Image (spheres, rainbow, N blue to C red):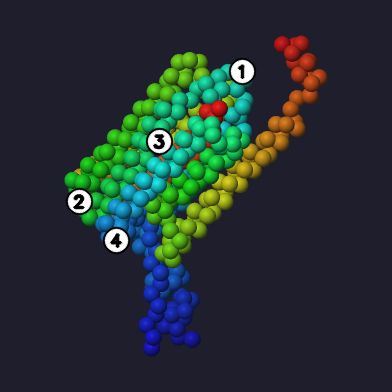
Amino acid sequence: MTQPQPEPRNVAPGEPHDSMLSETLSYIVGLGLALLLTGVSFWVASTTSLWGPGVATGLVVLAIAQMGVHLVFFLHITSGPDNTNNVLALAFGVLIVFLVMIGTIWIMGHMNSNMGPSPEIMNLQTQRG
Amino acid sequence: MTTSEASAIGLTHGGSEDTGLGNRGPQSKSIVVPYGFWLFVLSDMVLFSALFATYASLVHATDGGPVTSQLFDRTNVAIETLALLISSFICGLAMIAAKRKEMLWTQIFLFFTGLFGFVFLLIEIKEFAGMVAIGAGPQRSAFLSAFFTLVGCHGAHVTAGLLWIGTMMAQIWAKGFQPHITRRLLCLSVFWHALDIIWVAIFTIVYLIGTLP
């Protein structure tokens, strides 16, 4: 009779690794990367040498990268088999966050430009006020 | 079929160890509790996404009042960001110490986690008070209502986190590193790191993009 295969162990989010050195190193690498990305963000926001209209997009990309650094190095959310539940929950959360944000910005932007008060109404309000 | 066969394939509950959750039954509490808390943190991020969406929709609705570039100071934001990042880092060190049941180092690291969080909160309160003093309070315009709701909600979370850190320091001191105490500590660290993640979005979307030339 064969031994049953051990199921992959689950880990809790935020739980440090096993060896003290690799744990500390993970937090130090995370801190360094986060500092670097923050510094680049502030530099990108204040420099004039970059193409102006692209700066905002660049900042959002840098922010998403930094969130990834925090998730991996501080919260220890990895792609390993012991982390499947944590990653799936995160993926669902990210899906909802993007739906809410992009959906709202998209719809409200269109409502704002298409459904503003017409000039006549604006005129009436001005006269009444 | 016999009773033992039925229980072996999970058809009965009487005297069976099989809970329908695989060979070993449910995960231990040290996994389930932080996982549940992780789900809470993710739902908290969904809450913040709604506040971000509101802010993005209303950022130009200033009603003739002050606009983003007149109100925000990048130096302040840089200090706040640094304070919260260092706080998050030290929180990680506290978890490493707590795992090895080092009472003194856990307490020291948790103290500095809270201290840097407190520095962050003080700067934020000072900023809010300064804005209210120049007539840019939450009643001034839709943009400022959205701003104070979003950033204030994060500040409220940090305040709650500070109270939690103080509570955990007292509990570790009084009860030692019992399993249920270390579970709470792990949840606290997840909460604290998540607050830093939300702050990354705030300083980028609200402060940096708001002060672009």
Q: Position of residue B122 (x, y in %)?
A: 35, 27
Mark 1 chain: B
Instruction: Indicate the position of residue B92 as horizontal and vertical percent values.
Output: 32, 48
Pointer 2 chain: B
Q: Amino acid under label 1?
A: Gly
Look at discs 3 and 4 and give the one toward the viewer: 3
- First in sequence: mark 1 or mark 3? 1
Category of crowding for the residue at label 1, using alpha-carbon neighbours closer than 10 angstroms: few (below 14), some (14–19), many (at least 20): few
B111 or B39, nearer to the observer: B111
The answer to whether residue B70 of the structure is visible from this angle is yes
Q: Measure the alpha-carbon separation of dots 4 and 1.
A: 57 Å
x, y percentage for residue A38? 43, 40
**Dot 4: chain letter:** A
**Sequence-wise first label, 2 or 3:** 3
- Determine which residue is flagged by label 4: A18
Quarter holding the C terminus of chain A? top right
How far is mark 2 from mark 3, CA to CA? Answer: 29 Å
How far apart are the two marked residues, 1 and 2, measured between alpha carbons? 57 Å
Q: Residue at x 42, y 24 (%)?
A: B127
Residue B98 lies, with reference to residue A55, above or below; the image says below
- Residue at numbered disc 3: B81
Q: Is residue B213 above or below residue A66?
A: above
Give the CA distance from mark 3 to mark 4: 30 Å
Q: Which numbered dot is residue B64?
A: 1
